[in-house]
Image (tube, helix red, strand yellow):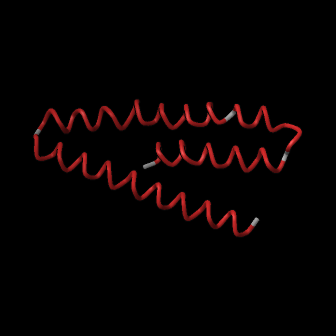
Amino acid sequence: MISFTVTSVGIIVVNLLASSFPENRAMLVQMSAVITMIGTLIHVMYLDPVLSRNADRDSGLAILSIEDFILGRIFSSALLCFIFILLVVLL
C-alpha cells in the first residue's frame, strides 16, 4: 500500500535526516507532517473510494477488499521495519 508506505517512511526518513543534519533538525522534523499529508491524501483520494465502491457492490467483495487492505498494511509495515533495521545496521 503506497499510502501507508509514504506515511511511515516520512516519519523514519525525517528523523534520520534530522540526526544527520542537526543544525536543521527542527525544520526537518516539522516536515514529517507534509510527508504524512501526502500519504493521507493518497489514502483518502484513491483507497477509500475503491473500498466504498466494493462495499456498495457486494458484501463478499467488501470483505475481500478489507482483507486485502489489512494484508497490504501489514506487508508495508513489515517491509518498512526491515528497511529501517537495515538502515540502522548500515549507518
Q: Check the image and report above or below for 65 versus 83.
A: above
Is 81 on the left-hand or right-hand side of 67?
Answer: right
Q: Where residue 1 sits in the image (x, y, percent)?
A: 42, 49
Task: Give the camera-side residue of 2 and 29.
Answer: 29
Task: Give the camera-side residue of 37 and 86.
Answer: 86
Is 41 on the left-hand or right-hand side of 48?
Answer: right
Q: Residue at x 42, y 36 (%)?
A: 43
Q: Residue at x 18, y 42 (%)?
A: 62
Q: Where residue 18 sits in the image (x, y, percent)?
A: 78, 44
Q: Where residue 12 sits in the image (x, y, percent)?
A: 64, 49
Q: Residue at x 47, y 60 (%)?
A: 78
Q: Where residue 35 sits in the image (x, y, percent)?
A: 61, 36
Q: Residue at x 17, y 36 (%)?
A: 55
Looking at the rendered image, the quarter that the C terminus falls into is bottom right
Query: How many labels sit on residues?
Result: 0
Q: Check the image and report above or below for 56 versus 63.
A: above
Q: Check the image and report above or below for 15 versus 45.
A: below
